[in-house]
Image (cartoon, grey):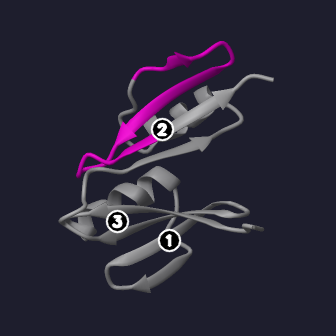
Amino acid sequence: MAMQVLFAGVPVRDFSAAHEFYVRLFGRAPEVVAHETEVMWRVTDGGWVYIVEDPERAGRSLVAIAVADLQETLDELAARGLRVGPVEPQGDAARKATVTDPDGNVVAFLEVDG
């Protein structure tokens, strides 16, 4: 099985509020507008995060994004007015911090040493 692209879906209740949040999170408008209640951001060559209006499923997603420099990422998010949780160790070689969208979906940013 040869997989090439990953789409991580984040269901939201209020599409407008979520769209505004994720524009701030990623620091740019979405690359793809699938339709009026679904948009996508490319976060790596083969990785996409999309939000879609789906009130019944909203608030239950967890997305993890590895970054080269966690502190730099946290500083960028703070400059965009986003509140990120504390940095926590993950095992012996990683650190993680999370941010929560208006529906309770969690986006984790992690840095792995090595």
Q: Amino acid at mark 3?
A: His
Residue occupied by mark 2: 108
Q: Is residue 46 left or right of residue 14?
A: right
Determine the residue positioned at 34% across, 65% down: 19
Q: Position of residue 105 (x, y in %)?
A: 32, 48
To which quarter of the image does residue 53 belong? bottom left
Cα distance between the residues tagged 1 and 2? 18 Å
Q: Nearer the viewer, residue 90 or 73?
A: 90
Q: Amino acid at mark 2?
A: Ala
Residue occupied by mark 1: 40
Residue occupied by mark 3: 19
Dot 1 or dot 2, earlier in sequence: 1
Residue span colored magenta: 86-107
Tell me the SS state at disc 2.
strand
Determine the residue positioned at 72% across, 67% down: 3
Q: Position of residue 27 (x, y in %)?
A: 51, 55
Q: Position of residue 12 (x, y in %)?
A: 27, 62
Q: Position of residue 80 (x, y in %)?
A: 43, 45
> Alpha-carbon neighbours of circle 2 within 10 Å: few (<14), some, or many (≥20)?
some
Which label lies toward us, 3 or 1? Answer: 1
